[in-house]
Image (cartoon, rainbow, N blue to C red):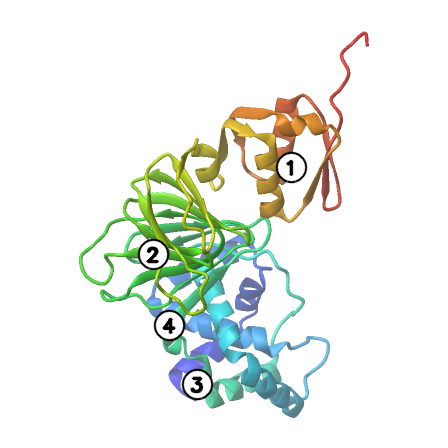
Amino acid sequence: MSQENHEIVSLLADESFQRWLSGNASDEEIRRWNEWLNTSPRHYELHAQAAALWKMAHFRSSALPDVEAEWQTLLRRVEFKAAKAVARDRSFAKRAWFGYMPSRRLAWAGLGAVAALSIALLWRNLPFHLSPKKQEIQLASTNYGQRLELNLPEGSTIILNANSSLCYPAVWTATTARQFELQGEAYFEVSSRPQGPQHDFIVRTYDGAVQVVGTQFTVHNRGQGTRVVVEEGGVEVAVADTSSGSKIPIARTLVEPGHLLHFQKGNRDAVPQPVHVGFHTTWWREHLVLQDTPFEQIIRRLEETHGIQIKIEDRTLLKRTLSGSIENRNLEVVTEALAKALRTSVRREGQMVIFNNLPKANGN
């Protein structure tokens, strides 16, 4: 067994490393493994490869597995799912690199000696499928209620909102083109516009492409067109044509700071509108800024972010607008703050959040 393979098998046999992969590690273990990960790019590669094998193994602690049966199962899984698994696991590795740990709790308790042997056999026979160096595209994704911060090697920062996914280059060099594909919502803070292949910074959605002219903006795409809000600098939006296979945009529009553009594929008439940017650009910060923001817009954002349904018993609330800032730590904090601002009450029943009727004034 090569030295690299030996290191991977040793990692997978370490119970603390297993707990870290599965999200069950203690705070001290998380700190220790994150420090290990950040000390060397080689550790990042080892982690990505070990995580890919870990997710495909599915070993149980209740009994020693049948090596031959497990081996055949793994071969079948890899034949159809190896590429997809590596993309997910490189995403997992990148999230750990940035200090993010997923909340999913896995049921596996540990790998025994036979499990480690099967992992070693799998690794020896599948170097091409599982080598991260063969991957050119990185996939980052989030579930409801999660956010993910990506700090790119060239200095830019991306905040990926809940229930979103982003494809971007997996390996960065001086010639790497800064091109991204987004589904969901993300905030972008672009560090600079160097000469050469990295001069352009382009975010693509189903509806078209957003090319950076300035520095800070958000892109929102959830199946009903794309919304771009510019905080600083500016962007140029190229609206995609509906013709099959056409790569020539049907319209180009410059969006300046303090403006919102909502556009859809095939629509050449979209025009930027002035807007209070706070509500659109502070969803990832500790406080959400509201500036004459309709309550109806706030509801839609909460439903998109947390995967819940909101019921309004008093429909007049939908016409109310709110200004100021509210704590943005979690769903409960936000809904309680909104209820207080609206002088009503709120309760949660499973995946349903209900804002009650306005209380009656004393004496009525």
Residue at 30% from the left image edge and 58% from the top image edge: 153
Asked whether the residues under the numbered discs 1 and 4 touch, taking CB atoms below 8 Å apart as contact, a structural biologist would say no
Q: Give the labeled residue for mark 4.
A: 136
Please state which amino acid type lies under the numbered disc 2. Answer: Ile
Q: Say whether disc 4 or disc 2 marks the residue closer to the N-terminus.
A: 4
Q: Give the labeled residue for mark 3.
A: 127
Element type where label 3 sits in the image:
helix
Q: Nearer the viewer, mark 2 or mark 1?
A: 2
Q: Say whether disc 1 or disc 4 marks the residue closer to the N-terminus.
A: 4
Q: Say whether disc 4 or disc 3 marks the residue closer to the N-terminus.
A: 3
Q: Give the labeled residue for mark 2.
A: 202
- Left or right of residue 2, residue 92 in this image: right
Q: Nearer the viewer, mark 4 or mark 3?
A: 4
Name the disc covering residue 332, or none.
1
Please state which amino acid type lies under the numbered disc 1. Answer: Glu
Tell me the quadrant of the picture where the C terminus can be found: top right
Of residues 79 and 316, the one drawn nearer to the viewer in this rendering: 316
Please state which amino acid type lies under the numbered disc 3. Answer: Pro
Other-residue count near label 2 (Cα within 10 Å), few / some / many at <14 / 14–19 / ≥20: some
Q: Say whether disc 3 or disc 1 marks the residue closer to the N-terminus.
A: 3
Q: Is residue 35 visible?
A: yes
Residue at 30% from the left image edge and 50% from the top image edge: 212
Please state which amino acid type lies under the numbered disc 4. Answer: Glu
Other-residue count near label 4 (Cα within 10 Å), few / some / many at <14 / 14–19 / ≥20: few
Return the residue found at the far right: 364
**Distance CA(mark 3)–CA(mark 1):** 46 Å
Tell me the quarter of the picture where residue 62 sits: bottom right
Q: Is residue 116 visible?
A: no
**Distance CA(mark 3)–CA(mark 2):** 33 Å
Residue 332 place in picture, x, y as percent:
64, 37
Compared to residue 299, the image places residue 200 above or below, namely: below
Q: Say whether disc 2 or disc 1 marks the residue closer to the N-terminus.
A: 2
